[in-house]
Amino acid sequence: MIVDPFRPPAAFRLLLHAAAGEGHLDLVAGDLHEEFVYLCERLGRGAGSRWYAAQVLRSIPQLLRLRIRSGELTYLLSAMASSAVPLLLLDRFWRFVYSQIPLKDGLDRAAGFLAADVAAVCLAAAISGAMAGSRRRAAMLSMAAAAGAGIGLWASVGSAPIFYAVAVLLAAPAGSVVGFAKWRGK
């Protein structure tokens, strides 16, 4: 594998993309990349990579503050909630239903209940995906929907079969992308 000497470390580029808002990403990433290239030419790739990593880590609090002020973080939190809240509410509902059945053993749910959970998460994520105004925001919202689905699965009380967990974790971002493409696609 050939490493491009003028490409910053991938992990810190992803971290920068996650922390920077849509309005600030190009500006911040461009400035950091220019300085990174200069340092790589002058001091070597190792020094440039260390500098880039330090700058990204130092910039995260300020970039998050800018996202909060612009309201962009609200979109991400709502996308997370759109996946987590239906899972948690349905989990509590299914627990109530099973508590009403005499001699019901365990918390395992029927396949129909699991399918209803997946459909609810997909629909809620599609609605949040429709809020995205651009492809970049749609991608961020789909990642937030997947994170919210993971939180919802983690916080649920009942046991979850692996196929169900995978279906939920795939349905949330897919629903978000479909919601963007269907109602706001360009």
Image (spheres, rainbow, N blue to C red):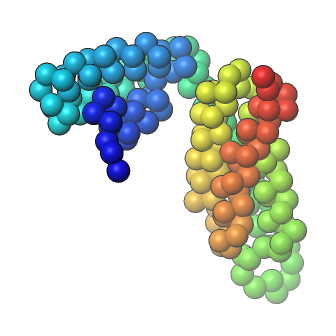
What x and y, as percent, mark residue 174? 73, 46
Name which residue lies at 40% across and 20% down: 29
Viewer-proximal residue, 112 or 34? 34
Tell me how many marks there are. Answer: 0
Give the residue at x 87% y 68%. Answer: 112
Q: Residue at x 74, y 33 (%)?
A: 129
Up-down relation of residue 116 to residue 30 (above or below): below
- 51 sits left or right of 62 in the view: left
Give me the residue at 22% from left, 18% from top.
38
Does residue 86 appear in the picture of this structure?
Answer: no
Q: Position of residue 106 (x, y in %)?
A: 72, 81
Quadrant containing the C terminus is top right
Is 25 placed left or right of 108 in the picture?
left
Q: Quadrant of residue 99?
A: bottom right
> Is any part of residue 183 visible from this angle?
yes
Residue 34 located left or right of residue 25: left
Which corner quadrant of the image does residue 135 belong to? Answer: top right
Q: Is residue 107 above or below residue 151?
A: below
The image position of residue 25, as x and y in percent, is 47, 19
Quadrant of the image occupied by residue 72: top right
Image coordinates of residue 94 in percent, x first then y, are 80, 65
Toward the left, the furthest residue is 43
Residue at the far front: name it.
2
Q: Give the side of residue 64 with respect to residue 8, left or right.
A: right
In the image, 102 versus 175, the foreground residue is 175
